[in-house]
Image (tube, helix red, strand yellow):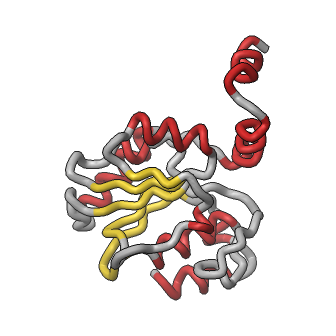
Amino acid sequence: EVEREALNEVWGDAEWRAARRTVLNAHYTNPEYVDAMWQALGQLGVPASGQVLAPGCGSGNFIDAAPAATTMTGVELDPTTAKIAQFTHPDATILNESFADTLLSGDGFDAVIGNVPFAQTVLHDPAYNQAGLSLHNHFIAKSLRMTKPGGVVAVMSSRWTMDARSERARREIAKYG
């Protein structure tokens, strides 16, 4: 109760609405998993000086573990969490927006890394989600499309990405993989 009162002193209605919108899909990623994923990217030839996207970056666990020469871009929907990520990672570019609104500029990223949010929600993204994929599958398919040819996408997802009864999401992901 003390924490809620303290938050009420600094958060207004907009901040509470944003927190409610994202709290069910926010996940803490164990640092051991983060480190293992970065090691895998290195073993797969992603340059340490590459440009890497972290969609749904949260407060920046994957940005924390990036090699020092990596140029990181994070996307985070929740404004408070995005501010934390930017404050703790001043050299990274943190976009405070829905991943549905993120557009590719340039020729793409060398890699994408992260723990995609999970939900049956379908984001309206006419550029990258014409198939109407669920949140986590949309993040995977869009990440693949935002990666340069020869780039690598390393994301955590639930077993439902590959074990779902419908093949629609797997077929969409396979188009870009």
Q: Is residue 151 visible?
A: yes
Q: Give the side of residue 73 with respect to residue 12, left or right.
A: left
Q: Quadrant of the C terminus?
A: bottom left
Question: Whole-percent x and y of residue 7?
Answer: 70, 22
Toward the top, the furthest residue is 2
Residue at 76 percent of width and 64 percent of height: 121
- Is 132 drawn above or below residue 99 in the view shown? below
Question: Whole-percent x and y of residue 60?
Answer: 45, 43
- Residue 110 falls in which quadrant of the image? bottom left
Q: Give the side of residue 95 with respect to residue 136, left or right.
A: left
Question: Whole-percent x and y of residue 138?
Answer: 62, 71
The answer to which of 100 and 34 lies nearer the viewer is 100
Residue at 35 percent of width and 66 percent of height: 111
Q: Give the side of residue 74 with respect to residue 39, left or right.
A: right
- Is 121 drawn above or below residue 9 in the view shown? below
- Is 127 drawn above or below residue 4 in the view shown? below
- Residue 1 falls in which quadrant of the image? top right
Question: Whole-percent x and y of residue 168?
Answer: 68, 84
Q: Is residue 167 visible?
A: no
The answer to which of 154 and 149 lies nearer the viewer is 149
Residue at 64 percent of width and 45 percent of height: 26
Q: Count of labels shown?
A: 0
- Is 115 drawn above or below residue 132 in the view shown? above
Residue at 51 percent of width and 58 percent of height: 55
